[in-house]
Every structure is written in structure tokens, then in C-alpha cells.
């Protein structure tokens, strides 16, 4: 007896008939908004807290200062400000947003999702959404997810936000980590391209490697090691990092994922208009760009002013690339990141505005 077929979900080349019959859109970034808290923590300030100095920090990381949120400001607050800025740039109301993706490792709380707080805070009535945890790769993963929601033909306005308040999980007695991180947020709106428009999302390549999970983590606070007097006393609710192991992995994988993504699209580093990497360490960025054959003038670096804002680094760097005239309509832009997990990702976009 022949099995019945449900027409609503009958597949053809992996897609439902209802979608296969449509001409699916491409996805493009149509607006960008960012927020950084006004308070600045300089290397000279850190010299008063731990045994370090400005020369050592700059030589090892490229960082000179970072923005720090005041005690009353949480990740959702920065995300809301960045989202409002992006929507204002696009000239639309929050009620038009259909999906909200918040990329963060520092949510306001375990639940509800920070996306819920952002949805309420901006007044995006009717939107759905979720949080995405991919550490420093979060924004690359989030924008790729948003692009696929649009390209599937199911959504027309997706808001992707990278927001992290890293200062809340940094041990300011640990000189190896406290010099690295800052706070900040960035948001983009992803929409369909117009018919015939040669712009938008091109491709993504990602990878995770859980064997490196112990190298960069916040050990306590989850289901494996719930909060207790002991975990607090042992300072286990802060970032713990095996610096050399993370550095070596990031140098290798940022290069490899970008190389492989370019190659499978028939491109080389010479074709890239601007590379916007995650801002974790200046030496990591320079090593990857040099091996890819991308000249320094085409690599956006702003780590000196912000430090590592985790999911916020790439949108903040994209804003600076636009304001400096280094990212223009029609340019091929390469986003790349390596983060805790390990998470690895790179994406290619043709800039749309």
C-alpha cells in the first residue's frame, strides 16, 4: 500500500513545494546601530588595580581603553539602545520587526531570554525571537541565521543584536583577563533585496570544536556547578582563560575559515573590500590578514578603543568602517570570528548601502 503524502510538507530538493515554487529573495543588511556606555576604563586605570602597565597591554593586545557600563545598566539596556538606533536609521517603527535575535554570553538573567526584554523595551509587538550563545562568534552566527530566515521567504525584517556586558563577569584581580574586555552593543536590520539587486548575503562557513571548551569559560553558575558560597569564594563566576591555548587556536582558525570560505566562492584576499574581524587581539587579526593576503588598509581594527566586547565587536567595527569611508555600497565585506566553545565562523556580504 502506497503511503499517503502530506502536500503541505512534501519535499523537493529539500524544500517544501510551497517554497520551492517561489523565487526566494536574497538577504541584505539595511541599517546599523551601536551603543557603548560613556564611562571609559584606560590602561592607566588598570595599573592601579592589578600588576600591569600600559606598554605591556598595548604590546600584547593592542588595547588602550574600553567602555564600562554603570552598575544600573544591563545587557538588554545596551541592546535596546543599539536597536533603537538601527530602526531610526532605517526610518521604521519597532512594530514592523518580525524577529529579534540577541547574541550574548551575558544575558540579564538565565530566563527570560534577553530577546524578550528587548522586544518589550523597543515595543516590537508581535515579534518573536531568541538568544544565541556563541561567545565572540555570536554576531557572525546571528546575522547568518537572520539572513537565512529572510532568504527562506518567511520573514522580511529580522533584527540581530550583539550585546555583552563583559565587565560583570571579569575578575579585576586577574591581570591576564581584566585588561581584555569591555562593554558594548550593535544591531543590524536584515531585509530582502530588491529584484535584481546585486547586494547582500553571499555565504557562511562555520565550525565548533568542543574539545576546547575548558580553555575559555565561566565555570560556575550553570547546571553543572550551581552558585554556592564555595563557587563565589573561589571566584568561579568570572571568565577563566588559558591564554596561550586560545591565542594559538584563534590565529590558526581565523585564517583557515576565511581562506576556505573565499576559496569555495572563487575569491582571494585581493577581492575583499574590507575585512571586519572580531576584535580579540591585534596580533591575531594581523596574523590572519597577512596570511590571507589582505593589506592592513583593508582590515578594520578598533580594538584600541573598545577592547573585546564579545558579540558587540563586529557591529562596532562595522560602524567605524562606514564612518571612516572604508566600507561603501557594493564592497565585498568579510566578517570573521573565533570564540569560546570553540566557535568559529566567517561570512561574506556584498554591502548594500
Image (cartoon, rainbow, N blue to C red):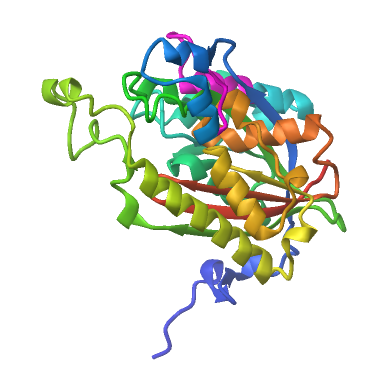
The quarter holding residue 229 reads top left
Instruction: State the image coordinates of residue 170 (x, y, percent, origin top left).
Output: 37, 24
Place residue 276 in its image quadrant: top right
State the residue at coordinates (73%, 71%).
266
Residue at 66% across, 51% down: 150
Q: Which residues are magenta?
A: 62-82
Q: Is residue 131 above or below residue 15?
A: above
| In the depicted structure, whether residue 138 falls above or below residue 174 | below
Residue occupying the far bottom of the picture: 1
Q: Quadrant of the C terminus?
A: top right
**Place of residue 198 in the rendered image (x, y in percent of width and height, measured from the top left):** 84, 56
The answer to which of 47 and 156 lies nearer the viewer is 47
- Please say if 194 is above or below 320: below
The answer to if 63 sits in the magenta stretch is yes
Count of numbered tags: 0
* Residue found farthest to the front: 55
At x 61% / y 19%, what residue is drawn? 81
For this view, does 254 lie left or right of residue 25? left
The answer to whether residue 261 shows anywhere in this view is yes
Quarter containing the N terminus: bottom left
The quarter of the displayed image where residue 195 is located: bottom right
- Which one is in front, 126 or 219? 219
Left or right of 110, for residue 337: right
Left or right, 20 with respect to 75, comes to right
Q: Residue furthest left?
A: 230
Q: Position of residue 92 (x, y in %)?
A: 75, 27
Q: Please report the residue visible at 58 percent of the width from the left and 25 percent of the height from the top.
A: 306
Amino acid at each position: 500500500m502506497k503511503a499517503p503524502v502530506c502536500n503541505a510538507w512534501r519535499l523537493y530538493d529539500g524544500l517544501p513545494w510551497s517554497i520551492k515554487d517561489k523565487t526566494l529573495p536574497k538577504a541584505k543588511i539595511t541599517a546599523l546601530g551601536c551603543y557603548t556606555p560613556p564611562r571609559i576604563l584606560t590602561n592607566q586605570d588598570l595599573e592601579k588595580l592589578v600588576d600591569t602597565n600600559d606598554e605591556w597591554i598595548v604590546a600584547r593586545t593592542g588595547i588602550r581603553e574600553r567602555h564600562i557600563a554603570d552598575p544600573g545598566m544591563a545587557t538588554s539596556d545596551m541592546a535596546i539602545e543599539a536597536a533603537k538606533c538601527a530602526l531610526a536609521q532605517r526610518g521604521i517603527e519597532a512594530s514592523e520587526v518580525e524577529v529579534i535575535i540577541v547574541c550574548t554570553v551575558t544575558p540579564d538573567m538565565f530566563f527570560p531570554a534577553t530577546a524578550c526584554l528587548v522586544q518589550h523595551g523597543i515595543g516590537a509587538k508581535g515579534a518573536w525571537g531568541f538568544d544565541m550563545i556563541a561567545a565572540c562568534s555570536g554576531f557572525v552566527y546571528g546575522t547568518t541565521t537572520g539572513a537565512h530566515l529572510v532568504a527562506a521567504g518567511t520573514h522580511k525584517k529580522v533584527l540581530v543584536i550583539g550585546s555583552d556586558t563583559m565587565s560583570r563577569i571579569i575578575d579585576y584581580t586577574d591581570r591576564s583577563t581584566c585588561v581584555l574586555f569591555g562593554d558594548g552593543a550593535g544591531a543590524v536590520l536584515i531585509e530582502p533585496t530588491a529584484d535584481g539587486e546585486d547586494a547582500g548575503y553571499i555565504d557562511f562557513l562555520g565550525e565548533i570544536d568542543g574539545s576546547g571548551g575548558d580553555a575559555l569559560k565561566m565555570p560556575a553558575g550553570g547546571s553543572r556547578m550551581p552558585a554556592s558560597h564555595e563557587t563565589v569564594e573561589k571566584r568561579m563566576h568570572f571568565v577563566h582563560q588559558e591564554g596561550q591555548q586560545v591565542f594559538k587556536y584563534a590565529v590558526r582558525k581565523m585564517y583557515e575559515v576565511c581562506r576556505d570560505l573565499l576559496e569555495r566562492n572563487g575569491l582571494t584576499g585581493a577581492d575583499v573590500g574590507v575585512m571586519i574581524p572580531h576584535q580579540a587581539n591585534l596580533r591575531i587579526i594581523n596574523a590572519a590578514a597577512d596570511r590571507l593576503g589582505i593589506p592592513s588598509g583593508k582590515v578594520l581594527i578598533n580594538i584600541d578603543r573598545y577592547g573585546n566586547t564579545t558579540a558587540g565587536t563586529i557591529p562596532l567595527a562595522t560602524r567605524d568602517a562606514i564612518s571612516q569611508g572604508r566600507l561603501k555600497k557594493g564592497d565585498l565585506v568579510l566578517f570573521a570570528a573565533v570564540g569560546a566553545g570553540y566557535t568559529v565562523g566567517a561570512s561574506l556580504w556584498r554591502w548594500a548601502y
